[in-house]
Amino acid sequence: MNRRLLILSLLIPSAFAQEATSGVEVGGTVSAQAVDSETLTAPPRDGSIVAAGFRAVLYPVWKINDHWAVSASLEAYSRPYFYNQFSTQGYGLTASILQATLSYSDYFPHGSIVIRAGELSSAFGSFLLRYDDAVNPLIDMPLTYGYYYEGVSTLPVAGVETDLTLGKFDARGQFVNSSAFNPRSVFERDQYGNWAGGAGYTIRQGLRIGGSIYRGPYLDRQYPYFFPGEWAPNRLPATAAGIDASWGQGPWNVYGEWQRFQLDYHVIPTLTFQGGYVEARRTLNPRWYLAARSAYLRSNEIPPYQVYEIAAGYRPGRNELIKLGYEIKQGSMIQGASANTLAIQFVTTFGPISAAFHQ
């Protein structure tokens, strides 16, 4: 399946009735999880070794006609929920817009074009297409992805994007208001134009290779490493390049990415880091699967570390999924199993709830 169809499958859980020319549809995913990790007990969180949380993602779509649509991805979760929040302070509820766009689409023999404007997920990388708990076979996400100050944020950037498919070839390009490293709200200061894009080629059914890039200013004046005397943020770009591959055949699905990032500075050394992962899922039968991911991160300023995650998934029903996972984190600054995590996650999907309109 090419990238354009993957995006549509996430934003529009099922197609509208063929005879309907417009309509509204809402689907969603709700997750609950419990984790056991010593990271939760360390400063600055200083909490209990066990924590529970929930997450909900809604996918409303308004199909205006055969070409125009408005769609969104809306998220709410309790904190801490994601693994990279275990070592941060505070508890609470967070809500955010992951995507909110007006789109125009057209289809022609052997291809399609989709133009979207609004709040967009970054066009860089491929994991964001599997960000939903019902799609991600594991519980954590790869090391270069996260909310703030990661190589690729899961938060949106505002701008325009064009997606094109032509036979086995697919391409995408974005011009947005801020960097995927440090997304800025349209109401915040220090917004600077950024470019992102990528392309892929499906060698044969189930096997695709691709690459992506982004470049543009990333700093804001409240950023923790924006020191006195630093150049103006618009003079310091972030540059990223990555390659990705996916393969699926029979009971197997395999994904992999490699990415390199460079964050330019003037008063301190430029930061460079790279990371990669390989992820595999093996379906045992219609109810059970096993999955694993091996990931690493290397930097010129931060001690290297690697993460190994395994999970078993069980589907008690068509719309339910239970995952049991264990993650091992290793590095020179990590003592023994102190950063390991045991987790259980229950995921349920609902909808689509739809109302079709006929003209």
Image (cartoon, helix red, strand yellow):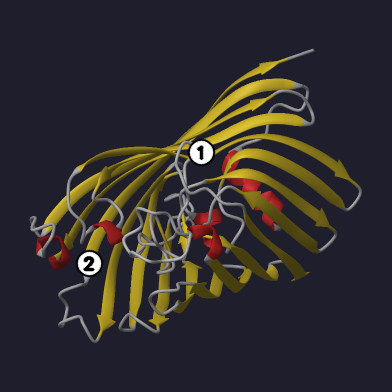
Instruction: Tell me which numbered mark, 1 or 2, is placed earlier along the sequence.
Output: 1
Viewer-proximal residue among 143 and 250: 143
Q: What element carries label 2?
A: strand
Q: Can residue 319 be seen in this view?
A: yes
Quarter of the figure with residue 96: top left
Residue 281: horizontal and vertical position, in percent? 48, 68
Residue at the spot of label 2: 341
Residue at the spot of label 1: 186
Q: Is mark 1 on a helix, strand or loop?
A: loop
What separation in Å lies between label 1 and label 2 (alpha carbons)?
Answer: 36 Å
Residue 127: horizontal and vertical position, in percent? 52, 61
Which residue sits at x=63%, y=43%?
159
Give the number of the mark in front: 1 or 2.
1
| Depicted 257 relative to depicted 40: above or below | below
| Depicted 23 relative to depicted 174: above or below | above
| Depicted 303 relative to depicted 173: above or below | below
Circles 1 and 2, Cβ within 8 Å, touching? The answer is no
Residue 212: horizontal and vertical position, in percent? 65, 67
- Residue 14's disc is none
| Depicted 232 relative to depicted 4: above or below | below
Question: Is residue 214 left or right of 88 when viewed as pictured?
Answer: right
Amino acid carrying label 1: it is Val
Residue 243: horizontal and vertical position, in percent? 62, 74
Which residue sits at x=62%, y=68%?
248
Which residue sits at x=55%, y=70%?
255
Packing grade of label 1 (10 A; few <14, some 14-19, many >=20) is some
Which residue sits at x=32%, y=80%?
302
Quarter of the figure with residue 219: bottom left
* On-image quarter of the N terminus: bottom right
* On-image quarter of the C terminus: top right
